[in-house]
Amino acid sequence: MATTFQEILDRIAIIDRDVSELNRLKSRLPADRPYSPSLQLSFDKQINNLLNERIGLMDLGILNPPEWLLTKKEEFEILSGSRDESKPDAASLSGDAPSEQLVLDFLRAIPKTEIHLHLEACVSKKTLKFLYEKNGNPLTDEEIEEKFNFKDLMGFIQVFFFVQSSVKEPGDLAYLIESLHDYLKANNIIYSEVFFAPSKFIQNGLDFDEMIEVMVGKIREIKTLDGTDIRILVDVSRSFGPENAMNNLNRVLKVRHPEVIGIGLGGAELMGPAKDYAEVFQVARESGLRTVAHSGEDDGPWAIWDAVTLCKAERIGHATSAIQDPELVQYMKDNHIPIEICVTSNVFTGKYVRKEQNHPVRYYYDQGLPLSINTDDPVIFNVNLTYEYFKLYRFLDFSLDEIIDLIKQSVFATFHPNKEELWSRIESEIIKVAESYEYTPKLPIAIPA
Ligand SMILES: [Zn+2]
């Protein structure tokens, strides 16, 4: 889509004005009223949408760009006082202040991994429309758009139900995997671990083994097609109770496909404390499955302690509240327990972090905690992994070298059977891409093997 340069400038001005106004109103909310959390969520959601839109504006094609933008860049820089004699030309990232567009292009072009992704949240609106039509319940674009235009946590959960309701038979999951593949390709994600939550589908009468067969078949097809690696972590889910989780685990234990690598504990954290699932984790661990848990997203550091000590989860999703407990931060560092960071998602949930600039990822990184960068729910939050990395650069003062270090850390946080080999493949590709941007990455931190 192309738009005029002036329209883009005007829109940015409006977005900046609205964001500062929303922040001002949010700061005046009383903290202790029953309605406060939901109002705060709604403010955060609006602010987040605006910031995403602002980033998205940089991807638009410019209709009839002003002459100076094409031919008089240097002159403009002198006029605007931004000219720096040492600053290289536009194709280079080696200067002090490369354009944000250039950074975004670079981040998109380099290979990455992602390991905290929910399958339902990767389905494109196009695929949803197709599935609803195929299953005899056609919807207009407007009706689908309306579902995604949610304002609060309840609306967010409704989107999940909406996606789950599009699946009527195991074969439909092939389309979900295809949609996930499109997302991975668009962001050059070459290896991913995705959560598949079967409970709702099983409740709707779908057979677990058949669903796994369909997904694994599609995953193998994709691997043959272009080498993209997808692995499944079955979300045993805390929303349906420990007994259901154990049933889900028993189903996973019967699966013999190497693409299904382990279990995750997702769902409403406050309704299902990790300690209630210690036995499920123990059985999984003793059976050779990999284990991860969402924790410290909606509950305090004590919940993370339970997830790492009682459940012995190998990675923790979110852990935004860990910053409150320096001992816990030290424990996770000493025991090499990576945190799956999801900045956009945490700002939306808004429990422990209200804006990107305040996200604890900067603190965790400076403390030397192993990290991985992720989107959680890309289609639902209208975000992607490229933007997540860009947000670190834009809002959290991460240099490009540090971002590449994070891409490396993200590789070593995966359950890939040969991380050294995967990283060396990614590293040589990064060096190649960086060369075309006249940039030589320096990796500041050695990753423990
Ligand atoms: Zn998640």
Image (tube, rainbow, N blue to C red):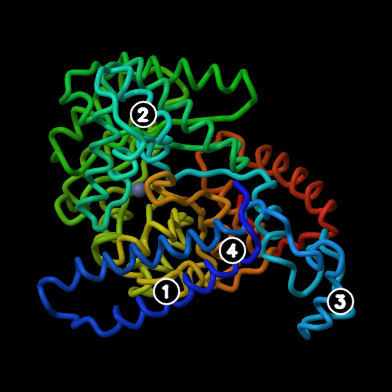
| Front-lying residue, 30 or 125 | 125
Which of the two discs, 3 and 1, labels the residue nearer the N terminus?
1
Give the answer, above or below, for where 370 lies relative to 28: above
Task: Out of 320 and 287, give the one closest to the viewer.
Answer: 320
Name the N-terminal-most of marks 4 and 3.
4
C-alpha span from label 1 to label 4: 16 Å
What SS does tag 3 mark?
Answer: helix
Q: Which mark's residue is nearer the viewer, 3 or 1?
A: 3
Name the amino acid, label 4. Ile
Q: Quadrant of residue 126?
A: top left
Q: Which mark is residue 73?
A: none
Give, as a three-letter code, the residue at label 3.
Answer: Glu
The label on residue 75 is 3
Q: Distance between the residues labelled 4 and 2?
A: 30 Å
Amino acid at dot 1: Val
Q: Which residue lies at the image location 58% right of the left edge and 60% below the top edge?
A: 390
Residue at which label 4 appears: 8
Q: Mark 2 or 3 closer to N-term? A: 3
Q: Position of residue 388 (x, y in %)?
A: 52, 56
Instruction: Please name the residue shown 44% across and 27% down the image.
Output: 177
Callout 1 crowding tier (Cα within 10 Å): few <14, some 14–19, many ≥20? some
Using the image, tell me which numbered label, if any, was put on residue 129. Answer: 2
The answer to whether mark 2 and mark 3 are in CB contact below 8 A is no
User: Which residue occupies 41% across, 74% down?
Assistant: 18
Which numbered disc covers residue 19?
1
Secondary structure beneath disc 2?
helix
